[in-house]
Every structure is written in structure tokens, then in C-alpha cells.
Image (cartoon, coloured by chain):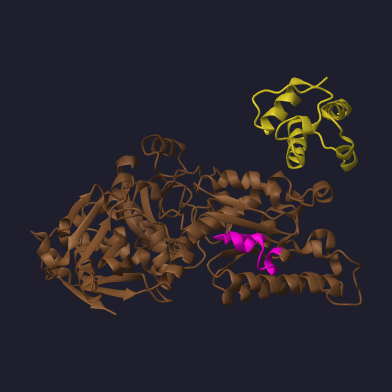
Chain colours: A brown, B yellow
Amino acid sequence: MKLTFLSNYSIEFVFDSFKKKLSSILKKTEIFYPGFNQYLQQIHNPQSELYKKNPEIIFLSVDFNYYLNSEFDLKNNPPISQESIKQIEQLFEAIRIIAEKLPATTIFVDNFFLDSNFNFGTLEYNYFGLEKYIIELNISLSNLANQYKNLKIVNLSQMLNRFGQKNLFDYRLYYLTKSKWNKKGIEELSNLYISHLKAYLGIRKKCIAVDLDNTLWGGIIGQDGIENIQLSNDGPGKAYYDFQLALLNLYKQGIILTICSKNSENVVNEVFEKHHYMILKPEHFAVKKINWNNKIENLVETAKELNIGLDSIVFLDDSKFERELVKQQLPQVEVPDLPEDSSLYTSFLKDLDFFNFHILTDDDFKRNESYRLNIERKKSESSFSNIEDYLRSLQMKIEIKEIDDFTFPRIVQLIQKTNQFNTTTKRYTDSDIGKMRNSEKWKIYSFSVSDKFGDNGIVGVFIIEIVKEKSEIIIDSFIMSCRVIGRDIEKAILFFIVDLAKKVGAETICAEIIPTSKNEPCRIVYKNFGFYQIEENKWLLNINHKSFELPDYFQIISL
Amino acid sequence: MVSEKLKNLILKELNLSDFDIKDETLAKDVPGWDSLKNFTIILSIEEEFGVKFLTEEILSIKNVGDIQKLIDLKVGNN
């Protein structure tokens, strides 16, 4: 992946730390930095290296305070020179230009902050509005990001609020090197950029498995009783209440919550039913392992029931013993060390950096519901003696749709995130899909599945390459969320693809499986449908040699 | 004389397994010691030795011996 940094200060001081962190999420990267203060020239010159490189990612880090370089005008409001204001206008213009000229590039722009050295103290907000001016600039920047989809804002001012300028800046470096970040500042700035890259790449955990005693409330319910546990919207119990609120916010963003607790279920149910400040309800948890079995077993079962990998789970438990056990026995599970002091729980959860998003799709809002429904489906499955009868009983409807502006983000999300049923694991980004969408050679489809239990939303993507000269179509990618695996949906999709091949005048369908450590569940999909093997991982289907029948338990709606 | 502690710290910052670092060694004599690394090394020295250099002092550093003298001065004063 090609990344470019543009900056009006010596941002190269951040690179060492940034690259180190970057290597843990991306294998091949190339960083281009034209040097300090070259950003305007690079952006305005169409022949510049910036456009030649055509990077996938740009970090535009412009420190507004370097613009405050001439005499202040205290009769003006904001009390800064026309020169400074002009520079800001130029910057906004430059942002517009790159956003338009590089539509396939994602541009991360730092928002603005006022260096405390330039703050007018008690005059601010009362007489002068320099800080107010910065806030207005940030609103304009945010509006610009609404206008250009490829523009994302890096909330640098919030990061500085959190850690404090005095803790992150070293003014000796500012005067000697034109970069004021000290070691801690460099660390935090690269952390912030990495969080944004993770959000961009869809690198995040899917599920949080929580303990109960001393985790969701203070005390041990089995010993202390419901009236003595700490959980309240006031006082020390508020630490647990706030932690639950933070977990609930993650739930609402589509992170799955489960319980993994050594407790008696009836005692815990009483808390759910009767405790006034128990803001997390039983329905927020997709799986509840409340028993006296060991937690290893419970976590393995949780992953199995949800059909997710153990490496998608974050386990939160106040007990060091349980944490060490899980770390040892299930090294794939992420086990951060919950602080000893419950007052730090919420800030600890924020620091985890496992759950970064740039947008929330309808599917994120619905995800938890859909996992819960799946568990109901599983229960109903056991009442049928054969799988066909069960599938028939579901009354499945599959809606297949060519990509549009509404399905675009979800399609990219599935491409980035899906590991198990993903035939080739090609991680196309926003910009790749944008380009493919505009080419006649490619057809990109998403599909959604609903049944009598409810709507699963968009659960799969397939990308078809049309090779006219060979009368062939290639299934470039076939991706399906683990939530709907095991319902023969792949057969219905392949049936649709055969139909599509006929429509575009193709005679053969070529497909590839690129094995990864995780995509076992999809490896025999083509074989099962009747493709024959032409190479180790290549499969071919001649559509004229066979007739295909859609299983009677599906209804396909093609939009 | 350049102390082992200082020498090792410089080598570690520059990812070098070994290099003959003496009082009169200049940054440009040591592979990888550019102006960027210069400040990383200074900051690490401050952290490691629990000292803080003034801007003027950082500017006055010509060779490794100068760094050692500054450290000795600061640590002595403490």
C-alpha cells in the first residue's frame, strides 16, 4: 500500500514509530514524504510526485499554529493577520483540489487546534475569539468531509485534549527541528493514525466476552446479594454503570457482547430483572455462558455458537487468574489486563483501539439482532430430522443486487472483514471498488438474506470479471458472512451466476480458491456445485454441459 | 571518556551491534546517525540518565565527548 505524508512541519520525526506500528497491520507499504512545507506545491502542480505516486492514503498534517507567523492584529477578531487567514483559505482550497483530483485516494486530514502559547487566556471567548475561530474551522473541515467521501478527519484536537499539550510537546524541538512532538507525542500521533488506518481497513474485533462479578458490577453477587453490589448512577457504583454504558455503545455499533461468568444463572437473572441500574439487558448478549465450567470451554463454545474465530474475541475479566488461563490456553483470544481499579474501566475500554469505525452501516446497527436470531434458528433446527426440511421451514428469500451508493460501504466492509467464507480474500478497498464499479469488465453484486425469523441484511458479495474474448466469466471473489453459512445459500448464488453467464453470452465460469489459514469453510463450494478442477486451486464449469436446478427452499429476487 | 552506558544507548538507538564510539566521534562518522536520529538519541539520553538539556546545550554538542561532558555535569549537579 502506498502512503503519502504532506505536512507543514517536520513530520518525519513520527515515521519510525509509525512504521513500527504499521508493520503489525500491513505487510507491504511504501511511504512517500516530499519534505517539510512542500504540500501546497505538491498539490498545485499536476506533474508533482504526489500525483505520479497516486497513493492509496494521504495523511495531511498541517499545524495551523505555524501560520501564526506574523504580527497579530488585536483590533481584529480573530486577532490574527490577514496573512494567516489567507494561508488557511489556501489550505482549504488545497484540500478540495486533492479530494477532487485523487478521488480514489483516501485523505486523512488533522483537525485544527490552538497551541496554548497563542491562547489569549481570559480574553478568549470574552473579547477575542481565536479559539472560537479554530472551532469554526473544524466545523468547516467536517462539512468538507461530508462533501467529499474520500476525506476523513483525524480528531487531533481531541487527542491533545486527552493527553495535554504540555505532555506531548517539546518546544526545544520546535525551535531546533520544526516539529514539536516529544516522544510521547510521537507515540500518540502514530497511534491515532494507526487507529484511522484500522478503521479504513476494517481491522477490528467482533465480540467482547465479559465476566460479571467485579466487571459489570462491583462485588460478588452470589455472596453479597443484589442490594449490596456496586452499581449505580452516582458514587463509586457509577464506575460500573459508565462501563456498562460504554459497552452498550459498542453493542450499538455492532460489536457482539457475550457473558462468560462463573455464577449461578438464577442469581444473575435476578440482577437482570430487578437491579434498577443494570443498563445491559439479557437481550444485549448474544451468548450467555453463566455456569461453573471453566472459561476456556465457555469461550470455545461461544465462538462456535456465533460462528466466529476465537481471534475475533476480546475477553474482559477482573480476575488475573482467569485472564492468565485464557492467555495460556487460547492465545488467539485477545485478553487485555483490565485495570485493578474500576474507576479506570471506561477509559481503559476507550484505549483498547480494537473497535475503530469511520461509518456505521445499517448492518452494523442490525448485527447483534441477527446473531440473536441465529441462535433461535439453531434451536429450531434441532426439531427437524433432516436439513432440507429445516431449510424449507425457514422460507428464505435471497435478494441479489448490483452495487449502488447505498450498498457500497457494506460491500467494502464485507470484503475487508470476511475471513471464513472468502474464496480469494482479495482485500479491495474503497478506491479499488470505486474503480471496478466504473469498468464494464467488472460486475459487483451484494446479496441479502431474510427468512421467517427476520432480516439478516446484506450478508454477501460476489465479484464477476467478464472476459468477452474467451466467452468466459471469472468469479473473482465470493464472500459470505459467517452468520449465514450452512444454509446452502452459496448454491443459490452460483445458480444466479450461471444465469448471469448465459445472459452475457459466456460459456464457461472460471473460479479460484486461494487458501488461507481461515477460509476452510468455502474451499469445496465449487466442487459441490459441479465445477471440475483444472489446476490445484482452479475450477471450471461449462454451463452448456449441465442443467442446474435451484433448490426449492429458496426464493431469489434479483433487483 | 564515553561511558559504556552512553555508548550502548547510542548503539541501541541506531540499531548497531557494535561500533567504536570515542570522545571525538562525530555523528557523521557513525552509520545511520542523521539529524533525525540525533534528536531521538538526545531524548533517549535524557530519559535514560534523568537529565534535561537546554536548547543552547543541545546546539553546542559537536561530538560524543560533548554529550558525555553534559551528562556528567548534569548528573554531578544532581
Q: Quadrant of residue B16?
A: top right
How far across and how far down the image is residue A21, in percent? 57, 46
A206 over A327 or under it: above or below: below
How far across and how far down the image is residue B61, in percent? 86, 34
Q: Is residue A37 left or right of residue A24?
A: right
Q: Does the magenta stretch include residue A57?
A: yes
Residue A192 in sight here: yes
Counting the numbered discs, the total is 0
Q: Name the foreground residue: A258 vs A45.
A: A45
Most extreme residue toward the front is: A469
Q: Name the foreground residue: B51 vs A509.
A: A509
Q: In which quarter of the image is residue A96?
A: bottom right
Which residue is located at x 86 percent, y 63 percent?
Answer: A69
Which residue is located at x 83 percent, y 64 percent?
Answer: A119
- Give the position of the C terminus of chain A as an image quadrant: bottom left
Q: Is residue A30 left or right of residue A315?
A: right
Most extreme residue toward the bottom is: A559
Residue A277 in sight here: no
Q: Name the foreground residue: A336 vs A288.
A: A336
Q: Is residue A344 left or right of residue A174?
A: left
Q: In which quarter of the image is residue B54?
A: top right
Which residue is located at x 46 percent, y 58 percent?
Answer: A202
Q: Is residue A158 magenta?
A: no
How far across and how far down the image is residue A513, in percent? 28, 52
How far across and how far down the image is residue A46, in percent? 66, 68
Image: magenta residue range: A42-60
A440 over A509 or under it: above or below: below
Most extreme residue toward the left is: A385
Q: Is residue A462 left or right of residue A325?
A: left
A110 over B47 or under it: above or below: below
